[in-house]
Image (tube, coloured by chain):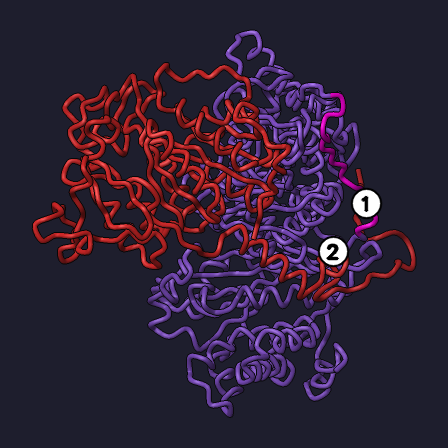
Chain colours: A red, B purple
Amino acid sequence: MTTDPLLPPEQKLSPNDYASGQEVRWCPGCGDYAILAQMKKILSQLGLPREKLVFISGIGCSSRFPYYLNTYGIHSIHGRAPAVATGLKTTRPDLSVWVITGDGDGLSIGGNHLLHCIRRNLDVNVILFNNRIYGLTKGQYSPTSPLGKVTKSTPAGSIDNPLHILSVAIGCEATFVARTVDVNQQHLGMVLRRAAEHRGTSFVEVYQNCIVFNDGAFEYATDRQLRSEHTLELEHGKPLVFGKDREKGIRLRGLDPEIVTLGGGVTEQDLLVHDEKATQPSLAYLLSRMHYPEFPEPIGVFRAVDRPKYDELLNQQIEEAIRARGPGNLDSLFHSGETWEVGKPEGGDAGEPRCKP
Amino acid sequence: MDENQAAAATTVLGPARSRVDLDAATVRFCGDSGDGMQLAGSQLTSTSALAGNDVATFPDYPAEIRAPRGTKAGVSGFQVHFANHKIFTPGDRVDALVAMNPAGLVTNLADLVPGGVLVVDANSFTARDLQLAGCGANPLEDGTVDGYQVFPVEITRLTRLAVKELNLGTKEADRCRNFFAMGLVFWLYDRPLEPTLRFIVDKFGRRPEVAEANRRALLAGFHYGDTTEAFACRYSVDPARLPPGTYRNMTGNQALAWGLLAAAKLSGCELFFGSYPITPASDILHELARHKQFGVRTFQAEDELAAITAAIGAAFGGAMAVTATSGPGLSLKAEGIGLAVMTELPLLVIDVQRAGPSTGLPTKTEQSDLNMALFGRHGECPLPVLAASSPADCFDVAREAWRIAVRSMTPVLVLSDAYVANGSEPWRIPRIEDLERIPVEHPGPPVDGADFQPYARDARLARPWALPGTPGLMHRIGGLEKQDGTGAVSYDPANHQHMVELRARKIAAIAGEIPPQRVEGPADARLLVLGWGGTYGALATAVRRLWERGASVAHAQVRYLNPLPANLGEILRRYDKVLVAELNRGQLLARLRAEYLIDAVGLKKTSGRPLAVQEVVEAVEKLIEP
C-alpha cells in the first residue's frame, strides 16, 4: 500500500504556498474559486509536499485548475485526464494524483475513461465539477442538464435524459463516492479531505455554479432558506434526517425511499440509517437516485469501501515475477528457446551476393 | 536422439531415389483456418533455421477466426523460403504447395511454379468439399493441375489410421493432419524431425494422448514419403553462410517487443506499454506482458485514446512510454500524438500498418499510413518517423527511435507493417554489452533557488525532462500554446509563430544526427530504385537479379521518413531515373517530388499482398529499356 510521504509539521505549508501565482481567469463569482480555495486549504492541512502532487485535467473551465496550483500538472485533452492519470499512477505510485474534470469533459467526451478508471479502482482522486452546462464553449447543454433545458443548442428544450453521475459511479462499483456543494465551504473541505485520504478511486461530484450560463442551477441546494429542505447531509451510522427543524426523515417502503415527518408515531428508529461501508452498493445507489424536487438530495460520503487498487495490483505482479524468475536478464531472454550457431566460413565472405553492375 | 537420427533411422528402408541439391526452396502450406497451417509453417521455419538455412516467411491468414469451413474465405496459408545463401524475401512463387482442401488449392495454385510439387489431401475432395470451395468440377480432374507434379495423398485417412490405437474421436484425430503433412514435407526436403518432436513435447506435454497422436502423425507422414514410391526424388538445401554468431528465428513483432525491452534497459528507464488490442499489432502487447520480470508495465487500455494518453502520463512521470496500434488505431491516436508534440514529451507510437482505409483488410499488408504518420494531425505538428525494413530490423528500429525521442524530447512514430510483423527471419543475437547506451537526463532540484524553466532549450532545442517528485521543479504542461522558456500559457501571436517554427526546427535538426542515406549499387547507374520499410527484401532481391542480368541499377531503402536524410536530395539528383516502389498510391513518391522537385515515377501496389520481386524487375526493365 502506498503511503503519501507527508511533510513534518514544522515544514507544513500554508494554503498560499500551493498557489502557482498564475492569474486566475475564471469569471468573477464562478464556483470554481471556492473549490480552488478549499483544495489549497486541505493540501496544506494534510501536509502533502507540492512536488509529490500531480493535478491532471481535460478541457473545460474546470480543467484550468492545475495551472493555478504550484504542483506538477497536466492540462491534457478533452476527456482523457483519467487515462493520463492511469499511465502516471501505475508507473509512479509514489505520487498523489488528482483528476479535475467537469460534466462535459468527464461524462460526455471522456465518459469511457471515467468508467474504466473507476471500475479499475485506480488510486486517484477524481473531482468532477458539475455545473450542468458547457461553460467554456459558451452555453450549450451538458449530459447533466435537465430535460427541457433551454440553451443555445437546445432552443426548444433539451430532449436528452440527464445522466446521474453518482449512479453511474456506483454502477462502476466505485469504492469512494461523495457529493458536495461549492458554497458549502466546510462540507466541501471535509469531502475533499476524505477523498484524499481514501485509497482507490475517490469520486467526488461538486455542485458548482456557472454564474454566466447557468446561474442558480443549484439554488435549491445552496440557498440558506431552501437547502435544509432540499438537501440531506449524510453521516455514517446516523438516520437520514433533514428539514429546517430536522423534523423529516427517509423511510424505506418496499424497495423505495419515502419522506416521513417525525412525530405522530414515527420516530428516528423507523428511518433508514446511512452505512457508507456497506459491502453491497445498493444503499448508495438508492441514495444516488433521490433527486430534487421529489426528494432532498443527499450530500456527503455515499460510499467508502476498500477494494484492491489497479496500480497496486499491477506493480505487485511485477514484484511477483521478479521474485519468481529473478530480475529480467536480456542475454538469457535472447538465448532462450531454439538457437543455433554459425561458425566462421572456411573461405570467402558470407553468402551476401555481390553487386554486379 | 540426435537431430538427424529420427530421420536417418527411417530412411534406410525406403526405395533408393535421386537426391537433388537446391540453393533454395519455397514451400507453402495451405488449408482451412482450422487446419493448423500456421503451426506447420512455423515448424518448417524453425527446423530450417536450426538446420542452418537462411529463412524468410510469409504467414497469410483470414481476418475471421473461423470463416465458414472449407470456403475460400477461410483459407489460411504459411509460406517458407529457405536457402543456402542470404535471402531477403519469402519468395514470389512457391516450389511446393501443400493443399489440405480444394479451397486451399484453387486460391493458391497460381503461385506454384510450373512443374512444381503439389501435394493434396485426396480425402478432402468430396462433392461437399468441392461445393464449399465453389468448384464446379474437381480441379484434380478437370485439367486445372496439369503441368504440375501432383501427389494426391490420403492425408485424412492415413492420419486417422496412424492414431487409431489412441482411440481419439474423429475430430481430434483429424486435428493431427497438419503433422502428417509436415512429416511428408520434412521427408521431401530432408529436414530433421527432432525440433518438431521437441516442440510436440513442450506444447502438448500436458495432454499426453494429443502429444502422442501428433508424434505418430508426424512420423507417419515422414514414413509415407520414404516407403511409398510416389516420390521419385528428394531435395536438400545446404546451410547458408551467414555471418558467424548465435542465431534465432524472430518475427517482426517479437523483435520490436524485444527491441523495446533492450531500449528500456539501455536508457535506464522503466517500460510502460499502453495498447488496445488490434490486428496485426497485438502480439507486441502479448510478448511484453509475458516479461514482467523486466519491470515492464503493460496496460490494456479501454481504447486507443486511453492507450496513448496513458503513455503520455507515464512519459511525464519518467517512464519509457510506448503505445502500439494499426491504422484504425492511429487515426484515433492523432489527438494524443498532438498533445505529445505540444508537451514535448518523449514517447514511441508504433503503427503496424495493414490494408485500409477504415477496417480495410485487417490481416493483409500495406504501407498506406505514411501520410497519416507524417501529416495526420491538426495544426503544424511535426515528429520523427522511422520505418522497419525487415523482421529482425524491428529490434534496431525500436532502439533508434527511443534514442531520438529522448535526445530531442519528442514523440517518435515507428512504422512496421503486417508483412514485417508476422514474417520471420534469422536474427543474430547481439550481446547487450555491445549495444550503445541511450543517455537520459533529468534535472535535479534547483541549487540557487532560480526559477525553473520547463521550456528552456538545449543545443538540440530539446526542453528538460523534469520529473514529478523533484522538489522545486513543479511545473504545468498541456495542450495550450506555451511561452518559450517559462512554459506559461501564452496567446501572444509572436510567441506562437516562434514556437511553431521552433518545433519544426527541432525535428528538422534531427537530419544532422541520423546516418546518411546508403545506396547499394553504382553511383552512375541509370536508375535508382527507392523504397521504404518492409519492401526492402523484394527490392534488394530484385536489384540483385537485375545485376545478374547486367542492368545498371542501384537501390536505396529509406529508413528515416521524417526528417529525410540530409544527403537524400543529392542522391536522387544523381540518377537519370528514380523508381519509388511502395504499397500505396505513391505517398513517399509525392513527398519526394514535392521536397526535391525530381521527376520520380512510382510502382504502386495496393492488393494487400507484399511486393513481388518479379514485379519490381519488370518495372525496372520497362523503364531502362534502350
Residue B252 placement, left or right of B109: right
Distance from disc 1 to disc 2, alpha carbons, whole Å, reads: 34 Å
Q: Is residue B475 magenta?
A: no
Picture coordinates of residue B317, whole percent (x, y) = 61, 38
Q: Foreground mark, 1 or 2? A: 2
Report the front residue among A41 and A170: A41
Q: Main secondary structure of the magenta part?
A: loop
In the figure, is residue A152 to the left or right of B147? left
Residue at 34 percent of width and 33 percent of height: A206
Q: Are marks 1 and 2 on the same chain?
A: yes
* Residue at image location 42% in from the left, 30% down from the top: A78
Q: Residue at x 26, y 39 (%)?
A: A163
* Mark 1 element type: loop
Q: Which is nearer the N-term, disc 1 or disc 2?
A: 2
Q: Which residues are magenta?
A: B432-448
Where does label 1 land, which residue? A354
Question: Would you say A209 lies left or right of A119 here?
Answer: left
Instruction: Name the residue carrying label 2.
Output: A330
Amino acid type at circle 2 is: Leu
Where B181 falls versus A301 (above or below)?
A: below
What chain is tagged by disc 1? A
